[in-house]
Image (spheres, grey):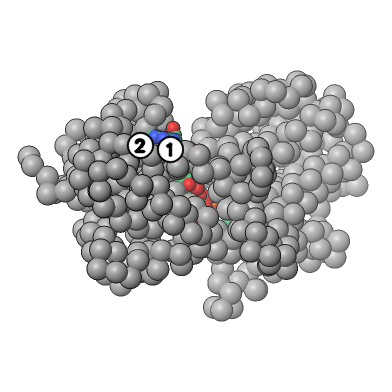
């Protein structure tokens, strides 16, 4: 079948793969090619075992792959043949040079710009899908305009708001799609071409258009606001533990104010994920570079509070376990940065593990999806760590269980059995407040919920 338009996506990661798969499923009249420099990732996308775990994704890929969705490493050919090019490469925090630890590392992004210039044979629309510092499109345009063959490239910003674990649902039923374009004839035409893709399934009123700069900055701001809510409730969780107030009750009382809203108010051991910290630090860096230190400090506090929360969680464990965990076995329930993903990037479990290993604890890590990543994350740390898919095996002979990821099935475990297999007194630290703390106390555990009174026999 011939397709009316050819769409290319450079970068077959957590965003590029699912986004293009959903678009391809919904737009059978377009052809979608997803390319990557990593041949293993591409082989994964072409196999029955996709390179990322996302509920519902297998089915979406199965519907479109080989029909109008193709994964390959043919970057040059992809660029040559495409009408619209989405760029969805990684934009991690810079680890070197100026801005190290704060600014975005744009080397992958810039490399794609040069590749586009080199291989494009006609005019193209370039879509920023990656999360980027505000005014990146300007730099992109300078590189693209420097092309020797007079090609015209129109740069559009279309940031992605999907969350891992719910990517397919978010892509199908997202609150909005944001398209930022220049207010010129070509800019408006490019925005319309990108909007046409989403119109295949998104209601018109959810497709928002703005300037390129507002769109780029909105993405950073959305993540900063979401993370700020978590740091706000986590700050209150510390206060609750001192005052016998209950952070869950507070979240309900505060969140039922419709001006505030109920979501993203779950106190936790800390937020993780590849983006919150990276994007806030990027925002901080941008504010500093525009000489706005108050703005920068304000947002940086969100990250500082998150670090405090992770460290506080471990300090409490050590303190409650008679001021030492050296030689004690601690079972970590969950390693992924959130439930329903195998992703461990910036997972609070990494910080918690590192701090516990510094205290010479022995760790037994269990997670249904993230063990392979956990092994890699902790590879350079010294100390005793074992990995098992079976939570019962992890808890056997342990002094403490610490819940670090809110996997639903942890609620259904047989905690009687777990309690009796542990050393006594058996401690339970619920870093996600997902368990039934009263029942656990009745079983005999020394229970430490987050942000409320501990339930113990001491
Ligand atoms: P990722 O690391 O999973 O995927 C990026 C892919 O790009 C990798 O497979 C890498 O090999 C490939 N790549 C790098 N340079 C390349 C090049 N020159 N040519 C071809 N391929 C290249 O990253 P991700 O999680 O998909 O994130 C991508 C972007 O989307 C980031 O800017 C991120 O901030 C943003 N974002 C991520 C999420 C998320 O949930 N992960 C959500 C919204 C936005
Ligand atoms: C987040 C945003 O929600 C997405 O909109 C955005 O597109 C994405 O970042 C991105 O730019 O990468 P994600 O990090 O995948 O998505 O997952 P979230 O559901 O936002 O969770 C982030 C972290 O916050 C997790 O560690 C989660 O456990 C934690 N969290 C979340 C809490 O501790 N409490 C809450 O109430 C909610």
Provide the secondary structure element on which disc 2 rests. Answer: helix
Confirm if mark 1 falls within 8 A of ligand 1: yes
Dot 1 and dot 2 residues touching (CB under 8 Å): yes
Residue at 85 percent across and 65 percent down: it is 243
Q: Where does label 1 land, which residue?
A: 111
Position above or below: 429 against 153: above
Q: Could you tell me residue 363's position as x and y percent?
A: 73, 27
Question: Badge 1, how many Cα within 10 Å: few under 14, some, many 20+?
Answer: few
- Determine whether, in the image, residue 369 is placed left or right of residue 40: right
**In front here: 405 or 18?**
18
Provide the secondary structure element on which disc 1 rests. Answer: helix
Camera sees residue 143: yes
Residue at 85 percent across and 31 percent down: it is 359
Q: Could you tell me residue 168's position as x and y percent?
A: 36, 48
Spatial separation of the CA atoms under disc 1 and disc 2? 6 Å
Tag of residue 115: 2
**In front here: 110 or 49?**
110
Question: Badge 2, how many Cα within 10 Å: few under 14, some, many 20+?
Answer: some
């Amino acid at each position: 079948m011939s397709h009316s338009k050819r769409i290319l996506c450079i970068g077959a990661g957590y965003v590029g793969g699912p986004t293009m798969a959903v678009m391809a499923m919904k737009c059978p009249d377009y052809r979608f090619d997803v390319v990557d420099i990593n041949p293993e990732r591409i082989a994964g996308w072409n196999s029955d075992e996709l390179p990322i775990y996302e509920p519902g994704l297998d089915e979406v890929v199965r519907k479109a792959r080989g029909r109008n969705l193709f994964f390959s490493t043919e970057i040059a050919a992809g660029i040559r043949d495409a009408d619209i090019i989405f760029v969805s490469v990684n934009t991690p925090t810079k680890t070197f040079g100026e801005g190290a630890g704060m600014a975005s590392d744009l080397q992958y992004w810039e490399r794609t710009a040069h590749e586009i210039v080199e291989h494009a044979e006609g005019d193209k629309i370039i879509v920023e899908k990656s999360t980027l510092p505000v005014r990146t499109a300007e730099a992109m345009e300078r590189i693209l305009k420097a092309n020797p063959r007079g090609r015209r490239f129109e740069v559009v910003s279309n940031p992605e708001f999907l969350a891992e674990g719910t990517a397919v649902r978010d892509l199908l039923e997202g609150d909005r799609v944001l398209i930022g374009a220049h207010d010129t004839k070509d800019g408006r035409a490019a925005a319309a071409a990108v909007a046409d893709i989403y119109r295949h399934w998104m209601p018109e009123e959810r497709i928002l258009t703005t300037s390129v700069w507002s769109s780029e900055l909105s993405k950073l701001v959305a993540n900063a606001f979401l993370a700020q809510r978590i740091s706000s409730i986590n700050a209150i969780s510390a206060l609750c533990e001192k005052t016998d107030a209950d952070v869950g009750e507070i979240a309900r009382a505060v969140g039922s104010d419709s001006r505030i809203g109920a979501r993203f108010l779950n106190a936790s051991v800390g937020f993780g994920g590849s983006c919150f910290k990276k994007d806030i630090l990027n925002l901080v860096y941008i504010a500093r570079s525009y000489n706005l230190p108050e703005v920068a400090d304000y947002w940086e506090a969100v990250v500082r509070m998150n670090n405090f929360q992770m460290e506080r969680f471990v300090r409490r464990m050590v303190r409650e376990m008679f001021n030492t965990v050296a030689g004690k076995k601690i079972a970590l329930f969950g390693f992924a940065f959130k439930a329903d993903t195998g992703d461990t990037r910036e997972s609070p479990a990494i910080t918690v593990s590192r701090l516990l290993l510094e205290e010479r604890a022995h760790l037994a890590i269990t997670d249904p999806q993230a063990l392979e990543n956990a092994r890699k994350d902790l590879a350079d740390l010294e100390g005793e760590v074992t990995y098992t898919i079976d939570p019962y095996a992890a808890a056997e002979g342990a002094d403490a269980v610490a819940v670090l990821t809110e996997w639903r099935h942890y609620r259904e475990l047989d905690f009687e059995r777990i309690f009796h297999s542990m050393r006594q007194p058996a401690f339970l630290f619920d870093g996600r407040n997902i368990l039934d703390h009263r029942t656990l106390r009745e079983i005999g555990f020394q229970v430490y919920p987050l942000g409320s009174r501990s339930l113990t026999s001491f």
